Image (tube, rainbow, N blue to C red):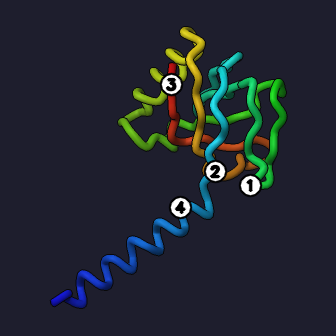
Amino acid sequence: MVSKFRVALLFLISLVSLKAVAVHEQTAYGKIVGIESRPWGMHIQTNFAGGAKNNCPVKAGDTYMYDFKYENSNNSPGASAEISMILAAFASQSDVAFHIYGCNEDGRRPVVGFILMRK
């Protein structure tokens, strides 16, 4: 017999999953072509577009079109894993993609969180 707790837990997990799908956008894979360090994180320029689902679309080639903020680290304290991945992808010209969590404060650039990398 399934307990009420398990039913409630499964329901809650399904709601969180639905919300995550609705909020997040995953970009296509492409190259990082520029990085600018900032006190709060990094501006990242790529050769691929994204952000349209979050109403802050950018075009490939726009200067510093994604924001990565240290506070959005999902994997490691101080965002060390994410920073390492961004720098490694830039140096090796590996393909990356991002999960977008919304727009920055002025609504012009998507804010990225999880970083996907492939060779």
> Disc 1, disc 3: CB below 8 Å?
no
Residue 68, given in percent of the width and then of the height, sits at 60, 35
Label 2 Cα crowd, 10 Å radius (few <14 / some 14-19 / many 20+): many
Q: Residue 20 carries which label?
A: 4
Residue at left offset 82%, top offset 24% = 61
Q: Which mark is residue 118?
A: 3
For disc 1, the marked residue is 53
Q: Nearer the viewer, mark 1 or mark 3?
A: 3
Depth order, front residue of 3/43: 3
Whichever of callouts 2 and 3 sits on the residue coming sooner in the sequence is 2
The mark tally for this picture is 4
Question: Dot 2 lies on which element?
Answer: strand
For disc 2, the marked residue is 25
Residue at left offset 23%, top offset 85% = 5
Q: Residue 65 carries which label?
A: none
Whichever of callouts 2 and 4 sits on the residue coming sooner in the sequence is 4
Residue 51, given in percent of the width and then of the height, sits at 74, 46
Residue at left offset 73%, top offset 54% = 54
Q: Which of marks 3 and 4 is in front?
A: 3
Residue 76, given in percent of the width and then of the height, sits at 36, 36
Between the C-alphas of marks 1 and 3, the distance is: 24 Å
Q: Which amino acid does label 3 sit on?
A: Arg
> Disc 2, disc 4: CB below 8 Å?
no
